[in-house]
Image (cartoon, helix red, strand yellow):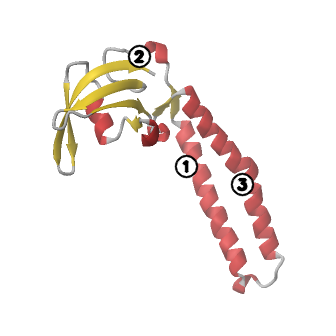
């Protein structure tokens, strides 16, 4: 049973492109490397052959993982999202009650998370704490050293 995960059109396109790259370009390269190593003689003492086979195994695992991810991937219909609550694709502006610092995050699926771009996974501690919250509510988020309280200041759509 595959897990369902939700993606934007951009995120789904990136996943498909990565899988295509692995299958159409990286897989033939791995096969070629094995063939070249095999041509070098005795396989029982051929470290190059062993390394090429291991690299191929790792590549196939990555391809299988992406295939499984895409099998459970669902495209988010942004027009159906409730903009009064923090959901996937919400842009949420919050303020830390302790230090008054304000920060804005976009809540995204795991595969699209990019902290440098302000995109956090809905499965991250902050993402989980913000899901379902409305403007004016307080999100209490469990972190390793306690609980941080954030005021939800604004919610908009990506």
Q: Earlier in the sequence, mark 2 or mark 1?
A: 1
Using a 10 Å C-alpha cutoff, classify the residue at mark 3 as few (fewer than 14 neighbours), some (14 to 19) or many (20 or more): some
Which mark is nearer the camera, 1 or 3? 3
In the depicted view, which residue is nearer to us: 18 or 135?
135
Task: Please state which of residues 12 and 83 is positioned toward the viewer in this rendering.
Answer: 83
Residue depicted at 72% across the width and 55% down the height: 27
Of mark 1 and mark 3, the one earlier in the sequence is 3
Residue identifier under label 2: 81
Question: Quick one: label 2 or label 3, which is nearer the N terminus?
Answer: 3
Q: Is residue 60 left or right of residue 116?
A: right
Q: Secondary structure at mark 2?
A: loop
- Residue matched to label 3: 26
Question: How far across and how far down the image is residue 137, in percent?
Answer: 19, 22
Q: Image height check: is 84 above or below 112?
A: above
Which residue was labeled with disc 1? Answer: 65
Q: Is residue 5 left or right of residue 47?
A: left
Q: Residue at x 72, y 75 (%)?
A: 49
How far apart are labels 2 and 3 at the CA level?
A: 38 Å
Give residue 114's position: percent from left, percent from top.
46, 41
Picture coordinates of residue 17 (x, y %)?
66, 39
- Viewer can see residue 36: yes
Residue at 64% from the left image edge and 44% from the top image edge:
18
Q: In the rendering, which numbered label is found on residue 105?
A: none
């Amino acid at each position: 049973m595959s897990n369902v995960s939700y993606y934007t059109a951009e995120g789904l396109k990136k996943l498909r492109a990565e899988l295509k790259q692995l299958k159409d370009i990286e897989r033939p390269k791995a096969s070629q490397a094995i063939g070249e190593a095999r041509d070098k003689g005795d396989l029982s003492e051929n470290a190059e052959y062993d390394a090429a086979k291991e690299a191929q195994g790792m590549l196939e695992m990555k391809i299988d993982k992406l295939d499984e991810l895409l099998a459970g991937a669902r495209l988010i219909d942004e027009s159906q999202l409730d903009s009064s609550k923090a959901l996937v694709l919400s842009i949420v502006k919050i303020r830390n009650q302790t230090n008054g610092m304000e920060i804005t995050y976009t809540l995204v699926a795991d595969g699209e998370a990019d902290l440098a771009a302000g995109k956090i996974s809905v499965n991250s501690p902050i993402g989980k704490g913000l899901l379902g919250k409305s403007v004016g509510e307080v999100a209490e988020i469990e972190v390793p050293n306690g609980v941080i309280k954030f005021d939800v200041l604004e919610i908009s759509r990506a």
